Image (cartoon, helix red, strand yellow):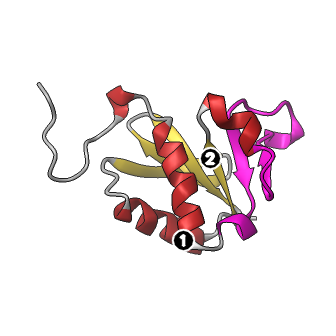
Amino acid sequence: MPYDQGLVARISDALDHLSAQGIRQKNVFGGRGFLMGKSTFAIAWEGDLIVKSPPQDYETLLQQPGVAAFSPDGEVPMSTWVVVAADAIAEEPELTDWLRRGLDTVPPRHRTPPRGMDVAP
């Protein structure tokens, strides 16, 4: 099943509201990935969201309803990556919270400052 284009649009809108800069998209794992620099932080996959979580939060996040470890092709789970079911991101605040978690995992060297902020020399 291809990725949900409506979800891709919702993700793009949410990232705009977060003032996330330097975001690009590309196809990843049969879904539509969202990257900052070279770091993928979220993927629209079918109707679900695959998101990278901060390592210290991974085990706790797996306990939330609608969240499972991301295991491509049923193999060993990719550490810190979770699948968030469509039901768990049906509302914009929840989707935004998950995207914020993903953005928090982007290394500082790949981050672009929000609009209106200067980059320190």
Numbered label attached to residue 61: none
- 17 shown above or below 23: below
Q: Bin the neighbour count of mark 1 within 10 Å (Cα to Cα): few under 14, some 14-19, many 20 and up.
A: few
- 29 shown above or below 119: below
Q: What amino acid type is highlighted by mark number 1? A: Glu
Tell me which corner region of the image, top left, top right, bottom left or bottom right, holds residue 80: top right
Going 54% across and 67% down the picture, which residue do you hit? Answer: 93
Nearer the observer, 105 or 74: 105
**Range covered by the magenta-colored residues:** 62-89
x, y percent for residue 53:
61, 39
Residue beneath disc 1: 92
Tell me which corner region of the image, top left, top right, bottom left or bottom right, holds residue 109: top left
x, y percent for residue 118:
13, 40
Q: Residue furthest right?
A: 74
Q: Check if residue 117 falls in the magenta segment.
A: no
Q: Nearer the viewer, mark 1 or mark 2?
A: 1
Residue beneath disc 2: 51
x, y percent for residue 44:
61, 58
Q: CA distance from mark 1 to mark 2?
A: 16 Å
Numbered-mark total: 2
Q: What amino acid type is highlighted by mark number 2? A: Val
Q: Bin the neighbour count of mark 2 within 10 Å (Cα to Cα): few under 14, some 14-19, many 20 and up.
A: many
x, y percent for residue 111:
33, 37
